[in-house]
Amino acid sequence: MKHVHVKTHGGARIPTLALLAALCTQLAGPAQAQVPAAAAPLTTAASSADCPPLLRQRFDRLQDEVEQDLCQYRGQVLLVVNTASFCGFTGQYEGLEALYARYRDRGFVVLGFPSNDFGRQEPGSNQAIADFCQNTFGVRFPMFGKSTVIGREANPLYRELAARTGQAPGWNFHKYLVARDGQTVRSFGSQVSPDNPVLIRDIERFLSTRM
């Protein structure tokens, strides 16, 4: 390889490649050698390990269909609800949003899962559902893309919730309340409104329990 030389103030000539190598060594310093190459993968593995199996699921966000990891909600109290836009219980959106606003700062979140399983009462696209929820009820709690919540085709979260409680949704706006540990789950039928005293009592009890 042909070396190109640069002239220093003293008139000596130093090979450019040698000069660059020396500068890089100085800038990098010895600290680089102290960072193990496997540090990043180990951190990722540790964060996955503390996520309850129930939440090791990924679903597309309703508004933009960007995939979301439910592990981001670990350690919180969850109210999982299958929703529909044209149901006699659709007005419960208002109460669900009120619950979310009331308790979110204490570690509570509502997770909405639109479904067309009951009475074909959620026929629209994800964008149509998102627009309806925002424009009609001002929904801000997290919602996910339309999916099936009953039977063999039920999404994996709903299959696990039904298995743990022995109760699959019987209609729109069935509710599963999940404790902070991601293990304890209570089931509430569609007729149980978001302001039902029993539901609120259990939400507050779960919120007061620390992991």
Image (cartoon, rainbow, N blue to C red):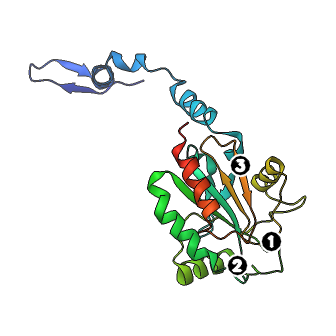
Q: Is residue 95 left or right of residue 5?
A: right
* Residue linked to disc 2: 89
Q: Tags 2 and 3 in contact by the CB under 8 Å rule? A: no
Image quarter of residue 60: bottom right
Q: Nearer the viewer, residue 139 or 19?
A: 139
Q: Is residue 48 above or below residue 205?
A: above
Outermost residue toward the left in this view: 10
Q: CA distance from mark 2 to mark 3?
A: 22 Å
The disc placed on residue 185 is: 3
Is the residue marked by circle 2 packed among few (<14), some (14-19), or many (20+) residues within 10 Å? Answer: some
Q: Residue at x 62, y 36 (%)?
A: 48
Which of the image's four quarters has the C terminus?
top right
The amino acid sitting under disc 1 is Trp
Q: Is residue 55 above or below residue 105?
A: above
Q: CA distance from mark 2 to mark 1?
A: 9 Å
Residue 140, percent from left and from top? 51, 69
Element under label 2?
loop
Element under label 1?
loop
Q: Is residue 59 left or right of residue 12?
A: right
Q: Tag 1 or tag 2, which sits nearer the N-term?
A: 2
* Residue linked to disc 1: 171
